[in-house]
Amino acid sequence: MSFASGALSAKAKAMYGRRIKHADYQALIQKKSVADVASYLKHETYYSDIMAGINEANIHRGQLEMLLRYDWFNRFSALLRYGNEKSHFYHYIIGHNEIEQIMACLHMIEHGDKLELVSKMPVHLAHYMSFDLFALAKVSDYEQLLEVVRHSPYYQILLESKPRYMSDFDYVGVESRLTKIYYDDLIKTIHSLFNGEKRDKIESMFTVLIELNNIIKIYRLKKYYNASADKIREVITPHYGSFSKEMINKMIEADDADEVLEQLRKSRYKNYVSDQPFMYIEYQAKAINYAINRQTINFSTDPDFVLMSYMVLSETEVDNLVNIIEGIRYHIAPDKIASLLIE
């Protein structure tokens, strides 16, 4: 391992050591306002750097959430400066955000809630995206969306999927097709940059994401749409890891969503699945991915594994903080907020 690679691993682990701890979360869920949360983050945690110069008494919820996500990407960029020769690979996070923004824009076109779209735009990623994020904010119809993404990898799928009326738009199908080309490209990139056991391990880390995403789709399509097995097969991404093709087919053929969850509880991930009945399937998937990456960062010294794990863990931390902010804003009980946190 080179000095730069060793420095990257050491730095990422040191940054992980500064993470928000259980005691911090317990203190934060007791706060009465967004300003109180901001004050705690500024004076009691490592977020003091990004909060410097900010008047926490007057900060808006959206501003605070944007600062937290901006800080997350800054940490990512700072780690890449430690000399990783494959740093361009790590911009895989951009593709995921691009698809999220396109789907949000499509919902905005149908429902007209442009304020919601703009408030959640990852402006810190704008420079890296394959389309103009700020032009996306100005979109008001499907034709304008096509023009914005014309030179991106997503144009052809969106062109082929253009509906006569937005009320007829196949959101699940289009998102699945966009996600498939994203993951297909990601796997090709992994194979071009890495070899042997390391390539297999990195591919496996992403295959976990793919199969958990597939399970979310299967569960939601059964629970909320009563979708047929054939329809479900059309929208999953055909990459398999811990869940073989046969196991995924068994979930697809399950009688109902509860059976899907029961199969997840019997899988290699059983120790990470909550038995609380009200937990969302998305929570279960994130908790599984968090646990796997926590184990990796604790025991691996490989800089690529450590970096990827740190980014998953720190992004989960930001999601936890956003859940706390939203919960306090809507006066949700502390114990309910706590149940949404992944630690």
Image (cartoon, grey):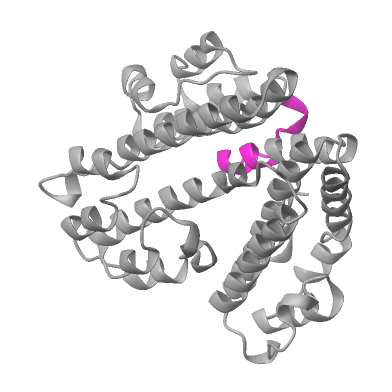
Q: Is residue 211 above or below residue 253?
A: below
Q: Nearer the viewer, residue 158 or 283?
A: 158
Residue 299, x across and y down, in percent: 89, 35
Q: Residue at image x 37%, y 69%?
A: 134
Q: Is residue 100 left or right of residue 74?
A: left
Q: Is residue 89 left or right of residue 188?
A: right
Q: Is residue 271 left or right of residue 249?
A: right
Q: Is residue 101 above or below residue 185?
A: below
Q: Nearer the viewer, residue 145 or 234?
A: 145
Furthest toward the left, the residue is 164
Q: Is residue 107 above or below residue 324?
A: above
Q: Residue at image x 62%, y 30%?
A: 193
Tell whether position 137 is magenta.
no
Report if residue 47 is visible in the image.
yes
Q: Residue at image x 83%, y 59%?
A: 19
Quadrant in the picture for the N terminus: top right
Residue 51, x across and y down, in percent: 72, 80
Q: Is residue 2 above or below residue 184?
A: below
Q: Which residues are magenta?
A: 269-287
Q: How many marks?
A: 0
Tell whether position 282 is magenta.
yes
Asked which quadrant contains residue 228, the reply is top left
Q: Residue at image x 62%, y 67%?
A: 70
Furthest toward the top, the residue is 246
Residue 234, x across and y down, in percent: 34, 23
